[in-house]
Amino acid sequence: KAGVTQTPRYLIKTRGQQVTLSCSPISGHRSVSWYQQTPGQGLQFLFEYFSETQRNKGNFPGRFSGRQFSNSRSEMNVSTLELGDSALYLCASSVSGTPSQETQYFGPGTRLLVL
Amino acid sequence: GQNIDQPTEMTATEGAIVQINCTYQTSGFNGLFWYQQHAGEAPTFLSYNVLDGLEEKGRFSSFLSRSKGYSYLLLKELQMKDSASYLCAVNRKAQKVTFGTGTKLQVIP
């Protein structure tokens, strides 16, 4: 079974631009979560989607948004990029998104650099 | 990480045993994950503790005390490939998972 895939792997943008990142979960997984990872803050939860609905949301500004398609693939969008948005963005999938019963499988991440 | 504390860095010798501690706020606690993350790679699942006690998986063991808000990851017979960051993550009610900032472990010969 193929693992979680994320595209692109690396991205360079300038302040004020917007960016869209893509995540394809493991086949059969319906829950997709997005995280931002920076050296100082560690992994921070952005949001989680299940069956095309946002089920949970972290404490990030409205510039960060996402969506999930019927095939469970998910995209996240960051508008009006700021220097502080430079980070590794990780996507994780699980069957139903119930952490008490299963684990999340992480993709390789998209490394975003904002200049 | 939000209300999750773990040491920033640790160094241990190949063949030795190392214990990585994690403390957390107990409100809404459901369970605790440990993940391993090598530099430049995605985190990979190591363990998930829900009940008090020690769970052993080969060279790795994880301990949990729910009342104390405390967990540790124990790595035995350290190998050079164990050099990585170890992330403690708490699963709380409403299905939110919060990660600590991670402990960077360096294994030296």
Image: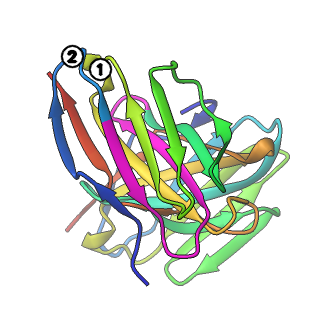
B25 relative position to A105: left or right? right
Residue displayed at 29% across by 20% down: A81
Chain of the residue displaying label 2: A
Amino acid carrying label 2: it is Arg
> Which chain's residue wears label 1?
A
**Which x, y percent locates residue A115?**
14, 21
Residue A92 visible (yes or no): yes
| Mark 2 and mark 1 residues within 8 Å of each other at the beta carbon | yes
Q: Secondary structure at mark 2?
A: loop
Considering the image in quadrants, where does the N terminus of chain A appear? bottom left
**Which residue does the numbered mark 2 point to in the structure image?**
A15
Q: Which mark is residue B45?
A: none
Q: Which residue is nearer to you in this view: B66 or A106?
A: A106
Question: Which amino acid, by three-letter code, is at mark 1?
Answer: Leu
- Which residue corresponds to the image point at 41% horizontal and 66% vertical from the top-left? A4
User: Does the magenta segment cover residue A33?
Assistant: yes
Figure colour scheme: rainbow
Q: Measured along the vertical axis of the image, is residue A24 above or below residue B8?
A: below
Q: Quadrant of residue B51?
A: bottom right
Q: Nearer the viewer, residue A36 or B62?
A: A36
Q: Is B71 in the magenta?
A: no
Q: Which residues are magenta?
A: A20-41
Which of the numbered marks, if any, corresponds to residue A81?
A: 1
Figure quadrant of residue B62: bottom right
Q: Residue A13's x, y, as percent?
A: 17, 28
Q: Is residue A27 left or right of residue A40?
A: right
A50 or B24, nearer to the observer: A50
Name above or below for residue B66 compared with residue B75: above
Q: Residues within 10 Å of mark 2 (few under 14, many from 20)?
A: some
Estimate the spatial distance between the alpha carbons at disc 2 and disc 1, rounded to whole Å: 5 Å
**Residue B54 percent location from the top left of the image:** 71, 70
